[in-house]
């Protein structure tokens, strides 16, 4: 009794202690600092270019980020950069990146860097036009003359000179309107359009005008404070948009809410940088979110092409992962092995070493080990029955919690439980056995080795399929049990690593098993177990669960996969989305049978580090992008926009390097490549280069593709470039064979000519011999011979 009172006092002291402890939940973001390659921690501006790179301007350098590493441009690396305090970043129509500094303008084209020195006593606003020129302003105060210049073909030209009425050091904003081919100029609180050298006033704001960056349209805010205050209230302002020569109010915010339906078509994010009241906001089509920065001090905000939010602060860059995943502080909920819920909606968390914790609203109540005699060392998967009672398997048996009443049933160690609502039975898995308890918490049946059960040392998971069979999983296999006939069949499909630790049924009634070697499902027609996607899901699956009829959750040591059940059953496609610390799921090694769905539809997942909660309604699936770019040749950087790569004269080999741009890569990027005339692609590789050799003279197109396992893409990641080879004729492969053939032909021709000459000479000699003989013949001799022959013929003397 004394011990019971002591533990009760300890529980009261442990309860409701959150006020003196760290926050229960952890912020869900990725923090990038100097350790990740950022040139400096104080971020001033950010921008995403047309290729997908995120550019970060700091007070000491410009940074290009591809989702994995930063490439920095600083004064220490490039001495031609007179100043590397970056104020603004933009991209021109030729794909080049421009950045303004306090002493000039920087241009980066991927290969070369050029710095244009300018004279300015204020920040240098810049804007590109649609002809590849960059416009900027140069102050000529105090005579109120403002020079508007542009850079073209590596030279600076004067475009406009205007006279303005402003403070001694006014706030200047500049924006080129492509549709009108004109410039907008904001000076303090007045908005002008420049027509030739004339200023046309468009709007007179209540506060300083700041064009909201990284948006397709021209937006700025209007507050209600006096102009000399220059501060607007984040809960009372108008959002204005410039379009076609006029300014319209697209949203009216009063007391933090819209007073009428806003005229914005997509969400707009911005931060109130450079005002006294600094705050990050997200305006959606129906609400205003003021805590978008999650408590992070914000200098600038960026929504990337996948609609992920990035915060630039005085402490580096933060990539926010949204609200789908919530991580719970391990200092408050340490080593949670299992989760369940009572009928009042209170959450219960059990730990092997730290007992049980009950969450009731914002109040936590601790029930340490041995709070109940022999009620300690809690294992996996507690359950609740239809009466609302909770059952926790532990090192001594089963702990029953009924409201405020605790009852320990000491029998043997049980590692898991399962409640069969149809038959109102509680199952418990222990050492080489599974036992059932009735509604009175009395044991009714035990299934063990005498029944043929052979699944290993312990029964680790119990479930019931749509046909009414019970399945017992253990370290060496799984068994199917018929309650009525008491028949049992063991399964181990020739896999030594077939320890089954988790199971679930999906909306189609298919039963899934998580094993030491992957994910399996039951083929009822063939009475066998089939492995799913062995190439991807080839490591231990500790948990498998469903999200309604939409998704199947499958764990791997480095995260969780979500499989699209709709496409799986409709098209027989296995589409897997991986979530890990790179895109929001920060837990490492999901726990054994550690998934639980609460009454609100949230999925609780235990891990080896912290407890995670998934809200499927806030989960963003799809819309993934991956870009691949050919960025280097033989170690030399290539321009951002390059269609043809001409190799040096007489060179027909090169090492081509690739760059992948992706900001939610849960796995390493893999590359594959081929030449245009090749029939097959190269094997997938994590190395980001290819060696080309023996290229023929002329142009050859090279194709490169990329993929990330667990990241289905909307569009294939594909890049191509034409490689130009120019080789002297005497160094080309055909030259020596052609030369040999020519020499051989000439030799044969000479030999044939000699033989013909010899033959012709012999024939002429014979002709000359006959002619000589003929010349020696006497005409009288010929007459006498013919007369004699005639006499013989007349006498018919045939023999003579």
Image (cartoon, rainbow, N blue to C red):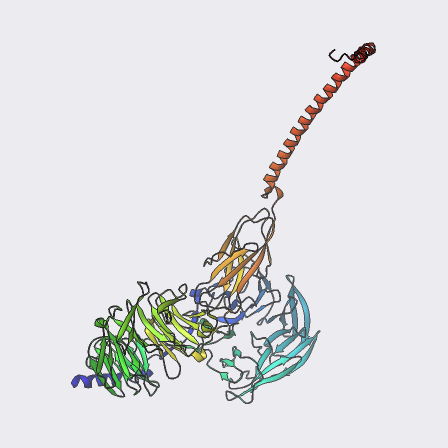
Q: Residue 403: x and y, percent? A: 27, 88
Q: Nearer the viewer, residue 568 or 232?
A: 568
Residue 208 shown left or right of residue 355 in the figure: right
Q: Residue 705: x and y, percent? A: 52, 61
Q: Is residue 670 above or below residue 351?
A: above
Residue 580 shown left or right of residue 13 in the figure: right
Residue at 60% across / 85% down in the picture?
249
Q: Residue 14: x and y, percent? A: 27, 83
- Give residue 197's quadrant in the image: bottom right
Whether residue 312 is visible? no
- Give residue 357's quadrant in the image: bottom left
Q: Is residue 441 above or below residue 793?
A: below
Q: Residue 539: x and y, percent? A: 36, 65
Q: Nearer the viewer, residue 277 or 657?
A: 657
Residue 513 shown left or right of residue 113 in the figure: left
Q: Nearer the viewer, residue 112 or 496?
A: 496
Whether residue 708 is visible? yes
Q: Quadrant of the C terminus?
A: top right
Kindly give the residue lying farthest to the left in the view shown. 1
Residue at 66% across / 29% down in the picture?
752
Q: Quadrant of the N terminus?
A: bottom left
- How many numbered marks does the figure carry? 0
Q: Nearer the viewer, residue 656 or 703?
A: 703
């Amino acid at each position: 009794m004394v011990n019971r009172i002591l533990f009760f006092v300890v529980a009261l002291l442990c309860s409701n202690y959150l006020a003196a402890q760290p926050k229960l939940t952890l912020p869900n973001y990725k923090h990038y600092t100097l350790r990740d390659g950022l040139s400096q921690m104080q971020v001033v501006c950010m921008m995403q270019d047309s290729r997908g790179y995120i550019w970060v301007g700091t007070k000491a350098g410009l940074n290009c980020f591809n989702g994995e590493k930063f490439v920095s441009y600083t004064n220490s690396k490039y001495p031609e950069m007179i100043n590397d305090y970056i104020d603004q970043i933009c991209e021109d129509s030729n794909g080049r990146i421009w950045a303004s500094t306090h002493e000039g303008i920087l241009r980066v084209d991927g290969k070369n860097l050029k710095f244009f020195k300018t004279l300015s006593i204020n920040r240098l606003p810049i804007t590109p036009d649609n002809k590849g020129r960059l416009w900027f302003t140069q102050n000529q105060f105090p005579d109120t003359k403002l020079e508007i210049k542009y850079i073209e073909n590596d030279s600076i030209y004067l475009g406009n000179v205007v006279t303005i009425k402003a403070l001694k050091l006014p706030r200047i904003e500049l924006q080129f309107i492509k549709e009108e081919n004109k410039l907008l100029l904001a000076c303090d609180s007045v908005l002008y359009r420049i027509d030739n050298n004339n200023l046309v006033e468009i709007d007179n704001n209540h506060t300083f005008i700041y064009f909201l960056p990284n948006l397709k349209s021209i937006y700025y805010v209007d507050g209600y404070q006096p102009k000399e205050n220059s501060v607007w209230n984040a809960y009372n302002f108008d959002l204005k948009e410039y379009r076609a020569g006029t300014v319209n109010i697209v949203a009216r915010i009063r007391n933090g809410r819209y007073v009428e339906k806003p005229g914005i078509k997509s969400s707009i994010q911005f931060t109130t940088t450079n005002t006294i009241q600094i705050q990050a906001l997200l305006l959606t089509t129906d609400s205003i979110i003021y805590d978008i920065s999650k408590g992070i001090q914000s200098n600038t905000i960026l929504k990337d092409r996948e609609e992920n939010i990035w915060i630039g602060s005085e402490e580096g860059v933060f990539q926010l992962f949204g609200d789908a995943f919530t991580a719970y502080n391990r200092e408050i909920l340490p080593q949670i092995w299992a989760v369940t819920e009572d009928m009042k909606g209170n959450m219960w968390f059990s730990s092997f070493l730290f007992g049980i914790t009950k969450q009731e609203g914002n109040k936590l109540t601790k029930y340490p080990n041995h709070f109940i005699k022999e009620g300690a060392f809690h294992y996996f998967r507690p359950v609740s029955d239809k009466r609302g009672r909770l059952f926790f398997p532990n090192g001594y048996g089963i702990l029953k919690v009924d409201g405020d009443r605790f009852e320990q049933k000491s029998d043997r160690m049980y590692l898991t439980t399962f409640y069969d609502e149809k038959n109102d039975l509680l199952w418990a898995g222990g050492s080489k056995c599974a036992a059932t308890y009735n509604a009175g918490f009395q044991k009714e049946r035990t299934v063990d080795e005498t029944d043929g059960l052979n699944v290993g040392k312990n029964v680790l998971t119990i479930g019931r399929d749509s046909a009414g069979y019970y399945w017992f999983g253990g370290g060496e296999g799984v068994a199917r049990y018929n309650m009525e006939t008491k028949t049992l069949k063991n399964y181990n499909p020739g896999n030594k690593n077939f320890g089954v630790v988790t199971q679930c049924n999906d909306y189609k009634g298919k039963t899934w098993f998580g094993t030491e070697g992957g994910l399996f499902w039951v083929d009822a027609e063939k009475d066998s177990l089939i492995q799913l996607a062995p190439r991807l899901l080839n490591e231990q699956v500790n948990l498998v669960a469903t999200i309604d009829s939409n998704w199947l959750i499958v764990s791997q040591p480095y995260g969780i996969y979500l499989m699209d059940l709709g496409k799986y059953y409709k098209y027989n496609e296995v589409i897997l989305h991986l979530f890990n610390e790179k895109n929001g799921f920060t837990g490492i090694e999901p726990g054994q049978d550690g998934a639980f769905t609460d009454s609100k539809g949230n999925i609780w997942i235990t891990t080896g580090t912290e407890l995670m909660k998934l809200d499927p309604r806030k989960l963003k699936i799809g819309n993934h992008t991956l870009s691949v770019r050919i960025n280097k040749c033989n170690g030399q950087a290539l321009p951002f926009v390059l269609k043809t790569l001409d190799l040096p004269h007489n060179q027909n080999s090169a090492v081509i390097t690739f760059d992948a741009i992706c900001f939610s890569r849960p796995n390493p990027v893999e590359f594959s490549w081929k030449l245009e005339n090749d029939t097959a692609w190269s094997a997938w590789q994590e190395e980001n280069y290819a060696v080309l050799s023996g290229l023929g003279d002329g142009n050859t197109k090279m194709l490169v593709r990329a993929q990330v396992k667990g990241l289905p893409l909307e569009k294939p990641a594909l890049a191509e470039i034409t490689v130009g080879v120019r080789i002297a004729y005497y160094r080309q492969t055909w030259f020596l064979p052609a030369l040999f053939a020519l020499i051989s032909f000439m030799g044969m021709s000479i030999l044939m000519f000699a033989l013909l000459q010899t033959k012709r000479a012999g024939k002429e000699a014979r002709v000359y011999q006959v002619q000589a003989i003929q010349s020696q013949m006497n005409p009288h001799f010929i007459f006498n011979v013919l007369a004699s022959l005639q006499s013989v013929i007349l006498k018919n003397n045939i023999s003579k």
